[in-house]
Image (cartoon, rainbow, N blue to C red):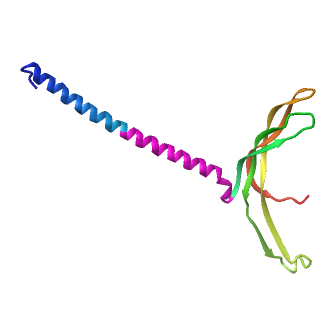
Amino acid sequence: MQITDGVSSIRGFAGISAASDRCQKMLTFWLLITALSLSNAFLVSTVNARDAWEKPGCHKVGHTRKISIPDCVEFPITTNACRGYCESWAIPSNFKASPNQPVTSVGQCCNIMETEPVEAKVLCVDGIRVLTFKSAVTCSCYHCKKD
């Protein structure tokens, strides 16, 4: 573009400015759409993580409870627990091998496989106490025990 006078040069800049404005608005629009999509994906994954225990298998979940110790301030603590559904089945036993046991049952239960300590400070009449609670690190379906 050849500039012949000051007026056309101002029009040229106005055209660039208008195009720049459109680009900026389009970029803002796409950034907004992207942000909304990402926040929606985050919310869905949060809901899915919270309800993961409802699916087959044994899953680590947060567990909050109130701790009440005589002469100390009651407090809530959140540690990890295991929750879920594990496979079990029953089959007819081999009568010749086990005449007194007509059914053989096999079951797995959701178990904590590994724990870690979680410390909490609690205010008591005789001062501050440091208490240690166990928190699940890993969970798995494992044979059920009868105690």
Give the residue at the far top of this rendering.
6
Residue shown at the point (84%, 75%) measured from the top left: 103
Give the residue at the far left of this rendering.
4
Question: Does residue 146 appear left or right of residue 14 in this picture?
Answer: right
Rendering quarter of residue 72:
top right
Question: Does residue 2 appear left or right of residue 73 in this picture?
Answer: left
Could you tell me residue 129's position as x and y percent? 88, 29
Residue 42 highlighted magenta (yes or no) = yes
Main SS type for the magenta part?
helix
Question: Does residue 29 appear left or right of residue 6 in this picture?
Answer: right
Q: In the image shown, does 70 or 3 lie closer to the viewer?
A: 70
Q: Is residue 27 above or below residue 112?
A: above
Residue shown at the point (67%, 58%) measured from the top left: 54
Q: In the image shown, does 80 or 27 lie closer to the viewer?
A: 27
Could you tell me residue 4's position as x and y percent? 6, 20
Q: In the image shown, does 86 or 126 lie closer to the viewer?
A: 126
Could you tell me residue 132's position as x and y percent? 84, 35
Please provide the residue range marked out in magenta: 29-56
Residue 86 highlighted magenta (yes or no) = no
Rendering quarter of residue 130:
top right
Quadrant where the image shows the N terminus: top left
Q: In the image shown, does 52 or 19 lie closer to the viewer?
A: 19
Could you tell me residue 145's position as x and y percent? 86, 58
